[in-house]
Amino acid sequence: MSGMRTMRIGNGPRRTGPGSRRPSPAAHGPATSGETSAADPAAVRPGLTLAAVAVVQFMVSLDLSVVNVGLPQIATGLGFGAVGLTWVIHAYALTFGGLLLLGGKAADRYGRRRVLLLGLGLFGLASLAGGFAREPGHLVAARAAQGVGAAALAPAALALLTATFPAGRARIRAFGVWSATNAAGGALGVLIGGLLTEYAGWRWVMWVNVPMAACALALARRGVAADPPPARTGRPDVLGAVLATAGMTLLVFGIVRTDRYPWGSAVTLTTLAVAAALLAAFVQVERTTAREPLVRLGLFANRSVAGANAYNLLVGAAMASAFYFMSLYLQRVLGNGAALTGLMFVPFALAVVAGSVLAVKLGHRLAPRTLLVIGGLLTAGGFAWFGLISPDGAFTTDVLGPSIIAGTGFGLCLGPVASAATIGVADQETGTASGLLNSARQIGAALGLAALGTAADDRTGPTVTPESLTDGYAFGLTLGAALLAAAALIALTVLPRTRPAPVARADDRDRLPARD
């Protein structure tokens, strides 16, 4: 994005008028000699900011899937038991899902750049340590630390993108790039994980994050302006933070453990009941606290925020299940190896990128609400096609076609849903809104995989054959199609009617970076 005009990024005010390069010095009060201005033209580089956010999102999405393929080799290499191995996944899911709200609030309160850099540093170091693990506990601890880092950097990166590109064509392009890297990381994680595991060893599924974290760190240090002095309205809501973190962590814990303890078991019911009680107490605290709340409940009165989060929860549930079922179908039914299975996900990843590019082009003509309805229905159609898989199927007849349809639809959804989740949100709450959106997706993924996986197992039955496995996977994929149809209905009925983004004019006070 070279050649783009300089613009104001970060938490501070926008440009004050036509041709203005700096906000008024009074915008943040008297400047101190040691303060680095976020409006310094040498520090404001929207292109580098977008590149840093794109690398961050690719890395976080990649890490959600890249480790899965290497689990059998990890078990052999470190001596994991069947139950202990699941904690390689659960440790990351628990800390990531449980701390996202806290990470978003930290970005708002202490600065997006600062939180992003800290999260990147922790994520990179944890990935490096995980690759050198010699005991099961070492790897589990490293995965938990990765989750903490991701919970800090993911909402900070999305909030930074929202603040840098607040409206217009530049916003559509930026969220298109973000959505393409988001989906490509998740889809290509299976391929990259398979190749690394088969040809380099399982430790590289951890080490692959290190150069990406270093690259994102360098881009963020050069391209993201220093945070302005934070505008804090009161003391932090420590009790609310503890309740939200504990409630979210227990919720994710109860869901992911349904593979061992069924939904109706005393362990699962007790865990989910305690999680619900903690989250209910959190809501009560947020309503009555005299401190600065972790999440201002009035945020949910914004129909765009509420609708986008509900939409993202259902899409996250469907997509996590689809990757799981199709990976098992390709390996356990069709008999493909890990590397070849990963290669078969490439058409889906390319279709997602194509859908993201199409969303950018259509975003000038269609409102986000319309794109979310079209994308949701298109993805639902692809999932329904996936639901027709057969035991004697083949890649070209059972996988390629629905991958292209579902991938294109998914690509149409990603940018608009992230954009909708932050429309009309005050600048000082974009981190919180970003944390909410990431939380919705993470909880949706855990809930969908647990619920749809249980339904698929019940359909498979006690006798495991290629036919029964296919029947179970097909049922789970069909349920995923139903979730996506419900997401499209939410977009149609909950999200407000908005017009497509207008073309920015030269005299627009909120003018965005445009190509010269």
Image (cartoon, rainbow, N blue to C red):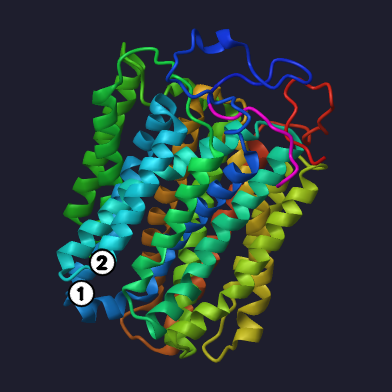
Relative placement, left or right, of 396 versus 477 is: right
Q: Is residue 247 above or below residue 62?
A: above
Let me know if residue 96 appears in the view.
no
Amino acid type, callout 2: Thr
Residue at the spot of label 1: 82
Q: Is residue 194 above or below residue 179?
A: below
Q: Is residue 384 above or below residue 168?
A: below
Relative placement, left or right, of 321 versus 7 is: left
Let me know if residue 121 appears in the view.
yes
Residue 282 at x, y = what percent? 30, 27
Which residue is painted at 39% across and 12% down in the image? 233
Relative placement, left or right, of 9 versus 153 is: right
Picture quarter with the C terminus: top right
Q: Nearer the viewer, residue 469 or 224?
A: 224
**Mark on residue 265?**
none
Tags 1 and 2 in contact by the CB under 8 Å rule?
A: yes
Helix or strand or loop: what does disc 2 sit on?
loop
Relative placement, left or right, of 108 versus 124 is: right
Q: Is residue 22 above or below residue 473?
A: above
Which residue is painted at 64% across and 51% down in the image? 177
Amino acid type, callout 1: Ala
Q: Residues within 10 Å of mark 1 (few under 14, many from 20)?
A: few
Which residue is painted at 69% across and 22% down in the image? 21
Please state the extent of the stretch shown in magenta in the rendering: 1-10
**Magenta span contains residue 9:** yes
